[in-house]
């Protein structure tokens, strides 16, 4: 009987601990605005600040793609497809070691039914106290609403360059 009581106590403790550790991210994906804001906040942080990769993964539908486009060392336009885990393993340490704050400065959103496309223009800083961005670009984010929440299904981005400046339509209106 004593062993049975101890077993129940241990199982109850494990169950309570598991429930305490599971976070409620419902508000982070309730709207397009909250989903995009969470995306920016979860990858942003000063040097040495770990990112909440569980929250990052919660934003993304299974099989979501993160697609970076830039020029290779030959000057050719190339793309790189990544899963969320690929992104975390390639960029995660860099974000923490260098500091990275991606800040939305403009947005254009189009929706139809349960799908949405967001062109979100960003500036990137190494620290939240920086005033001059070291990079700018546009994220093209495709989202899907399953009737309960918004899911990111793709993030496709490119950085601004001299030969590829951000068009005025995608910059903040003064």
Image (spheres, grey):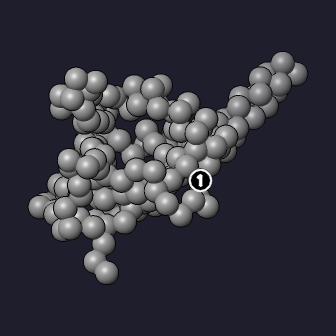
Residue at 61% of width from left, 35% of height from top?
97
Q: Residue furthest top?
A: 3
Q: Local crowd at mark 1 within 10 Å, few (<14), some, or many (≥20)?
A: some
Q: In front: 96, or 113?
A: 96
Residue 113 rendering spot, x and y as whole percentages: 13, 60
Residue position for label 1: 127
Q: In front: 76, or 171?
A: 76
Residue at 58% of width from left, 39% of height from top?
98
Q: Residue furthest bottom?
A: 174
Q: Is residue 27 left or right of residue 166?
A: right
- Asked whether residue 28 is in view, the answer is no
Q: In front: 126, or 115?
A: 126
Quadrant of the drawing holding the C terminus: bottom left
- Asked whether residue 5 is in view, the answer is yes
Callout 1: helix, strand or loop? loop
Q: Residue furthest left?
A: 112
Q: Is residue 98 left or right of residue 105?
A: right
Residue 56 rendering spot, x and y as whole percentages: 46, 42
Residue 156 falls in which quadrant of the image?
top left
Residue 20 rendering spot, x and y as whole percentages: 66, 44
Q: Is residue 24 left or right of residue 37?
A: right
């Amino acid at each position: 009987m004593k062993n049975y009581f101890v077993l129940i106590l241990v199982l109850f403790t494990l169950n309570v601990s598991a429930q305490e550790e599971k976070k409620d991210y419902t508000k982070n994906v309730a709207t397009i605005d909250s989903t995009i804001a969470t995306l920016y906040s979860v990858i942003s942080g000063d040097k040495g600040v770990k990112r909440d990769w569980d929250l990052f993964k919660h934003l993304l539908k299974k099989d979501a793609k993160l697609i970076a486009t830039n020029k290779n060392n030959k000057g050719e336009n190339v793309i790189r497809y990544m899963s969320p885990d690929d992104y975390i393993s390639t960029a995660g340490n860099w974000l923490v070691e260098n500091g990275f704050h991606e800040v939305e400065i403009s947005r254009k959103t189009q929706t139809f039914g349960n799908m949405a496309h967001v062109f979100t223009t960003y500036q990137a800083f190494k620290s939240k106290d920086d005033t001059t961005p070291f990079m700018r670009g546009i994220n093209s984010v495709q989202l899907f609403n399953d009737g309960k929440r918004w899911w990111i299904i793709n993030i496709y981005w490119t950085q601004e360059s001299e030969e590829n400046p951000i068009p005025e339509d995608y910059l903040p209106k003064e």
